[in-house]
Image (spheres, grey):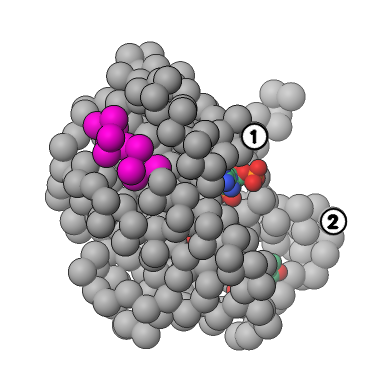
């Protein structure tokens, strides 16, 4: 089976590249923003005509939540218009689409985990553009999987986990917000889950929530990183209720995973276990190098 990965040099794309070696039965086409710009209708059309992939995992996205507030057009171009283009090519070539969306499609006013049928109401531009991308897919095609995830982190790229480690190593004081409750999600878990569903050639199409289990504030997340790295005594970590930002963020965005666990007969890992596992892996890599 031929699997196209767009945005392959981003965080999730790199996790997919890392784990792809465990799936020798799949043939991968990893394309970065340089080799396949999904906003170019012509490039996407030509690419699909030439390669005819069986699956397309769309990891390409505009993900800068703060900058999206003043780059609305660009955010919608990448997260919505280009997703429509991809869906149309997928439909034409009978390619199954795996697309990633976000907890930021919700306004955060709920007090219990969000299920897939809960009303969406994005409160920032990024969330609005991602919701519009979901709509483009469901209006265009049937053979799609949309996974809404949250607070992705990994050893790759720019994310909260790497920011905390970097700031801690610089000995910076850390003021971290307790205003949001959500779930940090190890992008390696999501990557492995997606690769397994492709290997199984799953036909359980639809919209799902996939984040790690449990809930946390960004402060809880930072604290566990520092504790596990035994840096908590060296770094001045302070909880702050309000950390001023341009974009509004949902105060509560925990996702309910019942649907995904039932449909794919899988057990989603808890965020704490997954974080501890990744830190052990990263530490042993550091030790080897
Ligand atoms: N990060 C998170 O916390 C969360 C992410 N998500 C979703 O998960 C998905 C993966 O996110 P993540 O890997 O973290 O994001 P990244 O920002 O790490 O990666 C996105 C990638 O998309 C590429 N890209 C941007 N524009 C285009 C374009 N026009 N054509 C092709 N590629 C493009 C970027 O390339 P370049 O850098 O060269 O522009 C980058 O490599 C996204 O859909 C995101 O919305 C959902 C919830 C949480
Ligand atoms: C760097 C930093 C951030 N914060 C706050 C700001 C914000 O409320 C929260 C997280 O900040 P970040 O900028 O890392 O994360 P943010 O851009 O909000 O992350 C989001 O990205 C998109 C792509 C998603 O889809 C979401 O699921 C979510 O992961 O932590 C602090 O409190 N202290 C700090 O030192």
Camera-side residue of 102 and 240: 102
Q: Which mark is residue 34?
A: 1
Around disc 2, counting alpha carbons within 10 Å, would you say few (fewer than 14), some (14 to 19), or many (20 or more)? few
Which residue is depicted at the point 84% across and 60% down? Answer: 171
Whereabouts is ligand 2, in terms of quadrant?
bottom right
**Rendered position, 167 above or below 25:** below
Q: Quadrant of residue 164?
A: bottom right
Question: Which secondary structure lies at badge 2?
Answer: loop
Horizontal side, residue 114 vs residue 251: left or right = left
**Rendered position, 247 above or below 98:** below
Is residue 33 among the parts visible in the rendering?
yes
Is residue 21 found inside the magenta-colored segment of the image? no
Q: Which mark is residue 170?
A: 2
Q: Which residues are magenta?
A: 86-96
Is the residue at mark 1 in contact range of ligand 1, meaning its CB lies under 8 Å from it? yes
Question: Which secondary structure lies at badge 1?
Answer: loop
């Amino acid at each position: 089976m031929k699997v196209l990965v767009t945005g392959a040099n981003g965080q999730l794309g790199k996790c997919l590249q890392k784990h792809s070696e465990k799936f020798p039965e799949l043939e991968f086409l990893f394309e970065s923003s340089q080799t396949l710009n999904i906003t170019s209708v012509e490039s996407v059309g030509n690419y699909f005509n030439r390669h005819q992939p069986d699956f397309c995992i769309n990891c390409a996205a505009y993900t800068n939540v703060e900058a999206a507030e003043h780059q609305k057009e660009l955010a919608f171009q990448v997260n919505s218009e280009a997703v429509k283009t991809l869906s149309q090519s997928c439909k034409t070539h009978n390619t199954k689409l795996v697309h990633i969306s976000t907890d930021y499609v919700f306004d955060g006013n709920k007090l219990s985990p969000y299920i897939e049928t809960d009303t969406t109401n994005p409160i920032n531009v990024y969330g609005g553009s991602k919701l519009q991308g979901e709509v483009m897919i469901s209006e265009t095609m049937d053979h799609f999987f949309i996974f809404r995830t949250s607070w992705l982190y990994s050893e790759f790229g720019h994310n909260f986990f790497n920011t905390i480690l970097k700031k801690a190593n610089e000995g910076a004081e850390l003021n971290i917000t307790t205003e949001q409750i959500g779930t940090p999600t190890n992008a390696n878990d999501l990557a492995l889950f997606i690769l397994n569903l492709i290997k199984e050639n799953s036909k359980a199409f639809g919209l799902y929530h996939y984040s790690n289990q449990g809930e946390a504030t960004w402060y809880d997340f930072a604290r566990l990183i520092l504790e596990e790295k035994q840096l908590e005594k060296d770094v001045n970590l302070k909880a702050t209720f309000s950390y001023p930002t341009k974009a509004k963020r949902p105060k509560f965005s925990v996702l309910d995973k019942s649907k995904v666990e039932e449909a794919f007969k899988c057990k989603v890992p808890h965020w704490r276990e997954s974080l501890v596992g990744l830190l052990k892996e990263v530490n042993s890599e550091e030790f080897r190098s």
